[in-house]
Amino acid sequence: MKNFINDFKTFLRRGNVIDLAIAFVIGGAFSAIVTSLVGNVIMPPIGLILNKVDFSNLFIVLHKGKVPGPYLTLAAAKNAGAVTLNYGLFVTSIISFLIVALVVFMFVRAINRLYPSKPEAPISKTCPFCAMEIPLAASRCPNCTSQLGQ
């Protein structure tokens, strides 16, 4: 048990946990911003272009609630106790996800540009006898047939 506690303390001191916690908090705040962007800025013009469609009120009634009748809004259907399939909210969530994925992709791509690229491992070597390029694993030169030391 004591070894477990010491390992856990070492894990916490590495800094990765703190970085993860900070990323989690920033991610939560970023999620709220993206949700607002999609719901308040992106979806209204798309709904306007698509004949004044309000995506937050696109739903299918699977089972009517206590109050029968057509439900004009999702809120009215929920208040009546109806079971609904909310495909408009699902479309909005997909758009939010795509925006978050795009931003994360651009961020990772920008971060990767800051680090120098690693040189590729050599796949060939030069024969010391004829100076021709040969495969790295070769033990005999295919050009001059010289025996190569490993």
Image (cartoon, grey):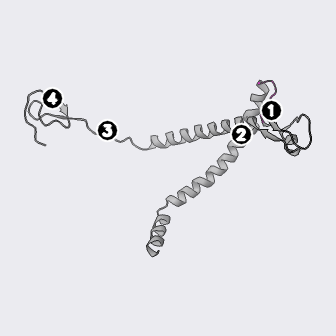
> Residue beneath label 1, please?
54
> As rendered, which of 94 and 45 lies closer to the eye?
94
Cα distance in 3D space between marks 2 and 4: 60 Å
Write the start and end of the magenta stretch as one range.
50-55
On residue 105, which mark appears?
A: none
Neighbourhood count class around disc 1 (C-alpha, 10 Å): few under 14, some 14–19, many 20 upward: some
Neighbourhood count class around disc 2 (C-alpha, 10 Å): few under 14, some 14–19, many 20 upward: some
> As rendered, which of 59 and 28 lies closer to the eye?
59
> Residue beneath label 2, please?
37
Instruction: Give the residue drawn at x 19%, y 37%.
Output: 137
> Residue beneath label 4, please?
132
On residue 120, which mark appears?
A: 3
Is residue 51 located in the magenta-colored stretch of the structure? yes
Instruction: Give the residue drawn at x 8%, y 30%.
Output: 145
Tags 2 and 4 touching, CB below 8 Å: no
Amino acid carrying mark 3 in the image: Glu
Instruction: Give the residue drawn at x 92%, y 41%.
Output: 67
User: In the structure shown, which secondary structural element does the residue marked by tag 1 occupy?
Assistant: loop
Q: Is residue 108 left or right of residue 68?
A: left
